[in-house]
Each structure stands twice: as structure tokens, then as C-alpha cells.
Image: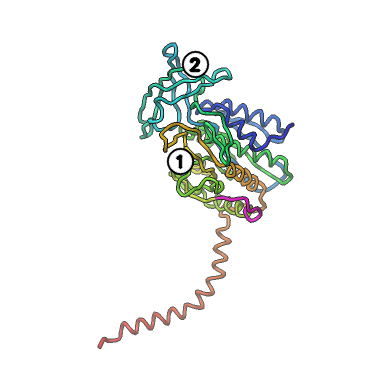
Amino acid sequence: MPQTTRHDVLMELLALPTAPLNEGHVADYVRGWADRRPAIRFAQDRFGNIVLRLRRGRGTQPPLVLCAHMDHPGFEARRMTGPRRLQADWRGWVHPDYFVGSRVRFHVDGRWVRGTIREVVVGKVRGRQRVKTAGIDVVRPVPPGAIGMWDLPEPVIRGERVYARGCDDIAGVATILAALDELRRGRRPVNVLALLTRAEEIGFGGALAACRAGTIPRRARVVAVETSSQIAGARMGEGPILRVGDWAAVFSPGLTAFCRQVAADLARKDRAFRFQRKLMDGGTCESTAYHAHGHETTGLCMALGRYHNMDTRRKRIAPEYIHVQDYENLVRWFVALATTRRRYDGRQGVDEMLGRLERELLPQLERSAGRVRRTQRAGNRQRSEPRP
């Protein structure tokens, strides 16, 4: 089997059409990818989420579950309302101001049918103004169910950046596949699952379904990967980000600390590896869903440019982008998490750190307590002496 590079899998996935509830092209790619790698077992739960399993050896670590979602905000064709006018449903969030006049493309029988948005219907969904449907002028009829995306160029690596119609979260899927590919060629014991979910962009549908269905082992360590808008001091190119929390929740401290320790180990071995640790509170991610259902959970992410294709400077739709080195280093971080010799105890370094501080500081406190008491007694005498 010809070896697929990390960049190959990234660029091939980024070229595929996808939208919430219409992740079939990405799922087919993943199935074919797994079929060519017998060591990696492919399965799907009843909701269509994909589970990939790689296990080698008899390690005692709880399984590591790497999660990403297979959708990106997009359209689904509903019906033709005229010879060249299509009505399509929109799923996901992009500010309504970006729609009218923007160009789109629908995937039909392996080819793209292009069109231009002429009108939209906007309504309030969960307290936020969102586009619900769009009227689109198309060059030829589009059948119901066809996937629609923004009419943007094919993915490309230009300099240090990867530009694509939708990095969020297809680039996350690619990091997991690339890491699994590297792990299967190794020899160390590994116990890794990949959970690739559906319909994240309309409310973590696949993640919530996986929790309800028991798709995730109860003892698992769950690490969800995202591409997240570069805010809160997170800088693109400075390394992947350990996401300690999002807008809604702070994630499991022990697992977060474990990921930081593994990254620090990796950085000591290789000066080219860099990482960041941030509270990415610009939105809510799947980690919140897993955490709320009782799983030990944290998040890793790559800083994303033009979140959901919104070029806020030019006020138009444009390709999303990530940094090549952030992608490379996130793959390496996943491999290190799966193969580290560190033991995960759920508190991860907290007991060790506090024990060291106790051994160091308690004797000092005890020796200095007499001095503090003498100073207090002297102060009391001064306050009790009558003033002249």
C-alpha cells in the first residue's frame, strides 16, 4: 500500500463536500482509509458516528479517545422553485450579513453546480439571529438533498498556511487519521479510539448521541480536537492549544494537566515542538458535551483564521486557514499522548506538586512560627502601652 503522508490526508479530506447531517463523503473517505489499514477497526454507531480502534499490547492505561466532527456549516438543497431558482436549508452559524450576493456551489453527481444567493429567511434560533433558508439562482437544476458549500477554491498550502472551504473541523479529522497512521506503524502498546461525530455545527448532535448510546467507554480519557478562532491571546503558528475550557465549561483538570505534562516532555526532547495553553471562551465545543455526561475530558485545538469563512476585515466570505506547523505539532502531540510512559491518575501531578511543597515549606513555617509569634507579642505590647 502506498504510504499516505500527513499532508495527503489533510488535503484530500479538505476537498470533500460536507454539511451538518450530510457527512457521507467524509465518512466514505474514512471507511476506505481504514479498510486499507487492517490494524485499525472501523465501526459506526446507530447515529452514524464513526469509531476507529487501534489496540496493541496489554497496557493498563484507560483508553484514549480522540474526537473530531465531520461537518462544516453548509446548505442542503430542498427544492427547485423555478427553472433556475433553488430553495435550500442552511445549517450552522454564519452572520446573516454575509449571505446575499455570495456565491455557492452544490455537489451533484460528482460535479459542482454553482449559484448566487439572492435572498434569505432569517429567524431566531436559541436566542440568536440565524439564516434558515436561502433562495439561490443556480446555473442548472439541483436535486433535493444535494450538499451546498461556499463557492471557494480547492484547498491549497500557501507558505505556512493551509487554505480551504472548511478547515473546521475537517482538519481535526485529518490530525486524528494522521496520528493513527503513525501509531499503527509503531511498536509501543497503544489503546486508542477515534470518535468522528456528525452534526456538531447545529448543536453537538453526534457527540450527545454518542454519550447517550454508550459509544464512549466509561473509563476513557476523552480529548476533543477543534479548530478555534484565534482569540484570547492564542496565536497561529505558536503551536496547538491545550483548551482548558470554553464559553460554557472548564474541563477536567487532571486530564488537562496530563496533556500539558506530555506536551512539556515532547518539547524538552524536540525544540521544534511548541504548544499553548488557553481558555478558548469564544464559543462552546464538543468537550462540554462529553464533560457534562461524566467523561474525563479536555480539548486541543488549532488556531483558525476566518472562523466559519467570515472575513471580518473585508466583510465577505473567504477560505478558512490554519498554520501548517500547528497541524504537524498536533499530530505529534496525539502520538505522544497515546505512547507516553506517564501514568494517568486523574489528578495528574497535583498530589506530587503539593507533596513537594509540603516537604519544602512546612519545616520552614514551623521554624519561623516562633519569630512570627514574638513579633506579634511585641506589637501587642506597643499597642497596650499608654500614649504620652
Q: Using the rendered image of the protein, determine whether residue 297 is visible from the camera's viewpoint.
A: no
Residue 90 position within the rendered picture, expressed as x and y whole percent measured from the top left = 44, 26
Between residues 275 and 316, which one lies in front from this camera angle? 316
Residue 132 position within the rendered picture, expressed as x and y whole percent measured from the top left = 40, 26
The residue at the far left in this view is: 388
Judge whether 156 appears above or below 333 on screen.
above
Q: Main secondary structure of the magenta part?
A: loop
Q: Is residue 93 left or right of residue 255?
A: left
Between the residue at mark 1 and the residue at mark 2, the CA separation in whole angstroms equals 34 Å
Helix, strand or loop under label 2:
loop
Q: Can you identify the residue that label 1 sits on?
A: 284
Question: Is there a contact, CB below 8 Å, between mark 1 and mark 2?
Answer: no
Judge whether 377 appears above or below 84 on screen.
below
The magenta span reads 267-275
Q: Is residue 312 left or right of residue 180?
A: left
Picture quarter with the N terminus: top right
| Mark earlier in primary sequence (1, 2) | 2
Instruction: Name the mark on residue 185.
Output: none
Is 270 a magenta residue? yes
Picture quarter with the C terminus: bottom left
Is 51 a magenta residue? no
Residue 334 position within the rendered picture, expressed as x and y whole percent measured from the top left = 62, 44
Residue name at image x 26 percent, y 86 percent: 387
Q: Can you identify the residue that label 2 sits on?
A: 142
Judge whether 107 appears above or below 329 on screen.
above
Kind of residue indicated by mark 1:
Thr
The residue at the far front in this view is: 159
